[in-house]
Amino acid sequence: MGPTLPQEARHGAQLADADERILIELARRTQRAEAGRDIVAEGTEPHSIILILDGWACRYKVLPDGKRLNTSIFLPGDLCEPFGVLPRFMDHALATLTPVVFARIPLSAIRRAAREHPRIEEALWWDLLAMTAIEREHMISLGRRLATERLGHVFCEFHLRLAMAGRVDGLSYDMPVTQSALSDLFGLSVVQTNRSLAELRQRGLISLRKRRLTILDLEGLREFSSFDGTYLQTAEPVVT
Amino acid sequence: MGPTLPQEARHGAQLADADERILIELARRTQRAEAGRDIVAEGTEPHSIILILDGWACRYKVLPDGKRLNTSIFLPGDLCEPFGVLPRFMDHALATLTPVVFARIPLSAIRRAAREHPRIEEALWWDLLAMTAIEREHMISLGRRLATERLGHVFCEFHLRLAMAGRVDGLSYDMPVTQSALSDLFGLSVVQTNRSLAELRQRGLISLRKRRLTILDLEGLREFSSFDGTYLQTAEPVVT
DNA sequence: TGCGCTCATTAACCTATGAAAAGGCCAACC
DNA sequence: GGTTGGCCTTTTCATAGGTTAATGAGCGCA
């Protein structure tokens, strides 16, 4: 699978082929960035939204004392910054976690496409809904789950999201991010992340070698981390 | 200030009087709920969005083991569930923290108003942006701030938000919620919330008696909790 | 082959927070 | 005016996770 194949660009929302083609057309001019680069910096006023075609990215914020939190993870096919329909200053930044191929879609083009193609407008809305549901679940992890549970939960989530994008092989998938990135996702120290991964391995729930994650016991992992994937299953939109 | 006065209904977004009147008109039929009641339950499919006219409310989720997290707090004048433009099943619930006066605005009416009055559509977008910025900052608290800092930070936030709604008296405001509600906001135990409040008091940063909060040292509290309110100051929207 | 980098792993010790339990305050109610 | 119940407060003890530091594994590169 070449990283820039147009079919990679489809995301969670359901789109008729014709509409999907319009989006793909908008994302034709792609860019690349190495790992660890800002795609959109904090405090700037973006005029495009970003479509990730390949690689992993994240939204993040940094505290005055240097502590960092990755508030969201974006996977191949994800649309970042869906709020971009209005320009405004970024209260956070968007950065790559791995080498990334992405497209910048101008707000004006998005707005026009949404106006002219109601299914696209709906797809954008559903993408937004899905992202906020994911962020809410992330808040639950931060507030009320133990480190091991946070990791187990997100591994289940990645599995579902990557499966929707056709990027899993059974119960295995590439998770090309560093343990430090996972730590910043969950507000943990790297040491604790490492300890918790060890525990998940020792419980026979996962295997993680060379940035490839395999869920050894899907039911067990879901049970262990109280994962209920319904928050990801945005039903088919209804036109009203 | 009577709780149902129409001017209470204005929220953060900037609206011309004429547009504001339309929103107020939509919110004319109000309802009441006691403290601790669900306004919108998890798993239901809402057909209206909720405008809080008086009292405090929250979004929350509950884990299988009974642990609860309040993911957002809604203050008088706040519009909850701004994603309601599309109907879908709720992945969380909306509940009152105090007795609340609110209005249910049908999605169809919102959609019509947005279509016919561009400024209203923009105001809805800006409301959405502000809410997500607030939630992102909440994630930072959950992930990377100590209990005392979380509390100090949210007290600064409440102060700004209530000031925008004309509900502060200098550096004092009513905070009619229980310590247990604050604990569920930050994933803390009630004991730790209490301990942390004691520390903020002892440092001379706040006073809190009879559900009335006074910030004794605004600069000190902001410094202590790394509060930077720019995430709340959504600038005037630009029509493009 | 060996240097130098980044990342993963482990250990020792320390701290913030959780859990359980008990008492205090206050307002509503009988 | 005493009782009841909700909330706040404080204490004690247990633990998840932070911090620091040292080691190891893998890999590009001279």
Image (spheres, coloured by chain):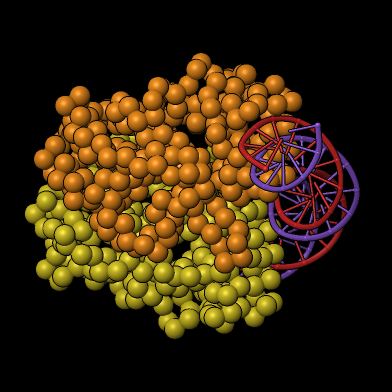
Chain colours: A orange, B yellow, C purple, D red
Residue B165 falls left or right of residue B197: left
B205 shown above or below B31 = below
Q: Residue at x 36, y 69 (%)?
A: B233
Q: Nearer the viewer, residue D10 or A185?
A: A185
Q: Nearer the viewer, residue B203 or C1?
A: C1
The quarter in which the N terminus of chain A is drawn is top left
Q: Quadrant for residue B202, please give it.
A: bottom right
Horizontal and vertical percent for residue A58?
A: 47, 45
A191 shown above or below A211 = below
Q: Residue at x 18, y 56 (%)?
A: B121
Q: Quadrant for residue B102, please give it.
A: bottom left
Q: Nearer the viewer, residue B83 or A40?
A: A40
Number of numbered markers: 0
Horizontal and vertical percent for residue A137?
A: 49, 41
Residue B56 visible in the displayed image: no
Q: Nearer the viewer, residue B112 or A185?
A: A185
Horizontal and vertical percent for residue B180?
A: 58, 56
Residue B164 falls left or right of residue B145: left
